[in-house]
Structures are given as structure tokens and as C-alpha cells.
Image (tube, rainbow, N blue to C red):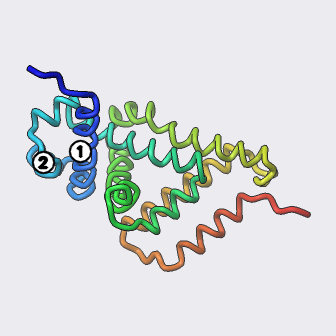
């Protein structure tokens, strides 16, 4: 039997994550049955669970994948840019990763954090990635003299994360996004250092 290349395994894993993202976003964790996951990914349960131990491991991997993508954007452009990407998400797989499907997955993570202690413990090990990237970016901005210095970096990190959570909830509820770009301008301005003060 021929060996499967690592590239093939990586592509299959990506196919599973991309398909399951829309399934979890549409049906929630409980509603994303194995049959629905098979339909969304175009793969059999054997193929799906060859890559992931169980549905919870798949969901955690998906949430971790989304956090890693966001952390990459944060490292280069900051957390406010992640929020702008959510507002401006065009069509396509990358946009869905930080668009409507991502929002659904993010809300499902929030719901499970409130209701499932075991999930909360497993997620805690993964959730620090985005916080660490945000803190590192703010520390870099502080050293460059671009960040206000009257508020601790950890407080600014928590502030931006709260704004992100509020934006996610707002968009997920389908509320109007008309002025949210301007709101993000205010948020960005609120963490900047203003010369001459």
C-alpha cells in the first residue's frame, strides 16, 4: 500500500477544518452531527476521525486554527485590523475563516465556555495565543512610542479583547454595521499616544 504524502494529509486536514467550520457555524456544536460533518467536508466519518480523535477535538482544532490565523494578523497589523477584516470580509474561504462562519464558531466557543467545564479547561490551554499576540503587538507599539503610556498594556489588551467580543456579538445578531468602521477608528485612536499631551 503506497504511503500518503504529508502534503496530502495536510490538505485533507485543511479540507476537514474548512468544511466543519461552516457546519459548526450553521448548526452549533450539538447540531453538527457526524452525518452533517460528512456532508460539509465531503468525506466519510472514517476520514474525518482519522485526523481528529472525536468531534470535540475537531471543534477545538478548528477554534485553535481560527485563533492562530487571527494571531498572525494581530502580529502584523494589530487586533483592530482583525476587527476591520470582520467588517470587510469579501467572499472566499479565507474571508469565511474570519467572516460569518468564523463568527458562528466563535459564538459557539463562547457558549460552550459558559456551559461546559471540561471544554473550558481544554480551551484555556489554547486561548492564550490571541491574547499573547495582542499583548506582544501592544508592547512593540509602546516601545516605538506609538501607544499611550498612562494605561498598562495588560489593561489595553483586555480592552481590545472586550471590543472584539462585543463586535462579534453585534455582527452575529445581525445588527447594522453601517458605522462600525468609524467606531473602530475611535477604538484605535483611544489606544494611541497623542503627542504634546
Residue topped by disc 2 = 42
Which residue is depicted at the point 73% across and 48% down? 141
Q: How many marks?
A: 2
Residue 29: numbered disc: none
Q: Which of 194 and 123 is in front in this view?
A: 194
Assign the C terminus to one quadrant of the image.
bottom right
Q: Residues within 10 Å of mark 1 (few under 14, many from 20)?
A: some
Q: Position of residue 101 (x, y in %)?
A: 31, 58
Judged left or right of residue 109, residue 68 is right
Q: Which of 13 and 22 is in front in this view?
A: 13
Residue topped by disc 1 = 15
Furthest residue to the right? 196
Whether residue 100 is situated above or below residue 128 in the rendered picture = below
Q: Position of residue 37 (x, y in %)?
A: 15, 47
Which residue is depicted at the point 58% across and 59% down? 80
Judged left or right of residue 62, residue 183 is right
Amino acid at each position: 500500500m503506497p504511503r500518503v504524502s504529508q502534503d496530502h494529509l495536510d490538505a485533507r486536514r485543511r479540507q476537514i477544518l474548512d468544511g466543519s467550520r461552516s457546519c459548526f457555524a450553521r448548526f452549533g456544536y450539538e447540531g453538527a452531527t457526524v452525518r452533517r460533518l460528512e456532508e460539509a467536508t465531503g468525506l466519510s466519518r472514517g476520514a474525518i476521525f482519522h485526523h481528529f480523535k472525536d468531534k470535540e477535538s475537531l471543534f477545538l482544532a478548528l477554534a485553535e486554527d481560527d485563533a492562530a490565523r487571527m494571531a498572525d494578523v494581530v502580529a502584523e497589523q494589530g487586533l483592530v485590523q482583525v476587527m476591520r477584516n470582520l467588517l470587510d470580509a469579501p467572499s472566499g474561504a479565507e474571508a469565511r475563516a474570519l467572516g460569518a462562519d468564523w463568527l458562528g464558531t466563535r459564538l459557539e466557543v463562547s457558549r460552550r465556555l459558559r456551559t461546559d467545564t471540561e471544554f473550558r479547561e481544554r480551551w484555556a490551554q489554547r486561548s492564550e495565543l490571541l491574547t499573547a499576540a495582542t499583548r506582544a503587538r501592544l508592547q512593540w507599539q509602546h516601545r516605538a512610542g506609538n501607544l499611550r503610556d498612562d494605561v498598562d498594556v495588560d489593561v489595553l489588551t483586555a480592552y481590545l479583547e472586550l471590543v472584539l467580543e462585543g463586535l462579534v456579538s453585534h455582527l452575529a445578531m445581525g445588527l447594522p454595521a453601517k458605522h462600525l468602521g468609524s467606531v473602530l477608528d475611535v477604538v484605535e485612536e483611544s489606544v494611541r499616544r497623542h503627542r504634546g499631551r
